[in-house]
Image (tube, rainbow, N blue to C red):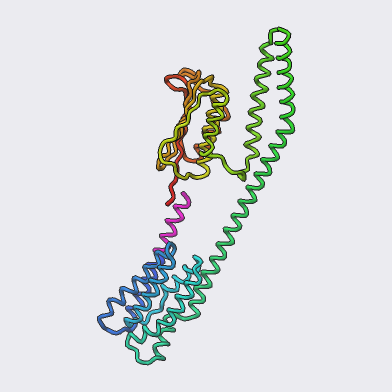
């Protein structure tokens, strides 16, 4: 939103400068001395055109440089002794955009052509022609305009570099903090949870081996230990993911489906539409949605089959994961950490997520992720 507003403000500013320069050139041309010939209307038109061309100096500085130069030569040849103010603005914009070599070449050409244009206007004295050309485009003005453009370009470059450095520093600190938290969790929780899990499983094993009835509380402790171990591993993996490793995306989804099949789930994968490149964030989010959905199916759904369908549309990547588990429309799903994480990822990308029981039984997860196409 702020970027669009700044672009509008920049466009308004460019047009204001262009209209102001055009009006100044036109008033100067009207008030100055010039031959009353048939070329006078053309001279006025070139004065206005040279000024109005500055409206595009931010988007196309080199073409504007050429247009203002041609207009300045044109109205000089038509007999209008008016300074090349528009060309100086164009020099400033071109140097600011980084086109220094082209600007120097164009300015040297202008300095050579303007005396010829003055001679073409009807002046027969070469010295007078050079004087008029020097008055229209002083070398000092050129140097000042180019220096101002270069100074601002360097200032903007330093500001961008400082911003990039701040972002990298903040990212590095966040990564260090995340790794610190991961180490603390690993050191403080993993060992204790592992002990609880092992002790519970040993107790269950011994009780069954003796033919005794296993207490429900002990079975609950065993199951809770397994769940806590899995959740802690997933949390540590997420904390240690610093985005420097190759991201997993759509190309790795078949591996998830194969892994689901290896634990006895009849999983299928269907990809529709024409596959195209998607942003890394969308690619990774699609993988996480399928991964979390299949994990939930394997843990909680008591399902026999699962289907993963990916529809590659021109402006949207649609993902749907269905199962035939025990969920029914009458049972409201309890949003866990995995589902909340999926929703946050999708919302952050401006997409939509729907996760609910199906009417015919089972559970469905549907996500639509917007894909911005670049030309």
| Residue 27 drawn at (x, y percent) | 34, 75
Residue 199: name its quadrant. top right
Q: Pick out the residue farthest to the left.
A: 38
Q: In the displayed structure, does residue 112 sit left or right of residue 221?
A: left
| Residue 215 drawn at (x, y percent) | 68, 10
| Residue 89 drawn at (x, y percent) | 44, 71
| Residue 132 drawn at (x, y percent) | 40, 85
Q: Residue at x 63, y 43 (%)?
A: 242
Is residue 315 within the magenta segment?
no
Is residue 18 shown above or below 306? below
Is residue 53 shown above or below 364? below
The reply to whether residue 286 is in sight is yes
> In this picture, which residue range is highlighted in magenta?
1-15
Q: Residue at x 44, y 63 (%)?
A: 58
Q: In the displayed structure, does residue 170 sit left or right of residue 89?
A: right
Residue 32: name its quadrant. bottom left
Q: In the displayed structure, does residue 3 sit left or right of residue 43?
A: right
Is residue 131 shown above or below 250? below
């Amino acid at each position: 939103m702020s970027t669009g507003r700044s672009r509008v403000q920049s466009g308004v500013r460019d047009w204001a400068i262009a209209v102001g320069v055009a009006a100044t050139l036109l008033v100067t041309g009207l008030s100055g001395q010039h031959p009353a010939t048939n070329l006078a209307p053309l001279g006025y038109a070139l004065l206005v055109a040279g000024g109005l061309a500055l409206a595009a100096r931010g988007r196309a500085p080199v073409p504007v440089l050429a247009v203002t130069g041609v207009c300045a030569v044109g109205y000089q040849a038509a007999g209008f002794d008016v300074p090349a103010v528009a060309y100086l603005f164009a020099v400033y914009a071109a140097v600011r955009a980084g086109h220094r070599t082209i600007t120097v070449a164009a300015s040297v050409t202008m300095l050579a052509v303007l005396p010829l244009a003055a001679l073409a206007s009807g002046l027969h004295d070469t010295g007078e022609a050079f004087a008029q050309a020097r008055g229209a485009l002083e070398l000092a003005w050129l140097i000042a305009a180019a220096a101002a453009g270069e100074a601002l370009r360097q200032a903007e470059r330093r500001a961008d570099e400082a911003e990039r450095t701040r972002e990298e520093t903040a990212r590095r600190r966040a990564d260090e903090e995340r790794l610190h938290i991961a180490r603390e969790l690993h050191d403080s929780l993993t060992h204790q949870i592992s002990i609880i899990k092992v002790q519970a499983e040993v107790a269950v094993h011994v009780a069954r081996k003796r033919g005794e009835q296993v207490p429900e509380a002990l079975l609950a402790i065993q199951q809770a230990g397994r769940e806590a171990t899995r959740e802690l591993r997933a949390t540590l993996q997420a904390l240690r993911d610093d985005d420097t490793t190759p991201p997993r995306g759509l190309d790795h989804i078949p591996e998830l489906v194969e892994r689901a099949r290896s634990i006895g789930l009849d999983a299928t994968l269907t990809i529709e539409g024409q596959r195209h490149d998607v942003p890394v964030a969308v690619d990774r989010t699609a993988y996480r949605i399928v991964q979390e959905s299949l994990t939930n199916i394997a843990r909680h759904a008591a399902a026999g089959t699962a289907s993963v369908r990916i529809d590659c549309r021109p402006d949207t990547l649609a993902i749907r994961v269905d199962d035939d588990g025990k969920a029914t429309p009458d049972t409201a799903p309890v949003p866990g950490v995995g589902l909340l994480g999926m929703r946050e990822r999708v919302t952050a990308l401006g997409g939509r997520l729907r996760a609910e029981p199906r009417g015919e039984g089972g559970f469905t997860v549907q996500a639509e992720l917007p894909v911005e196409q670049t030309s």
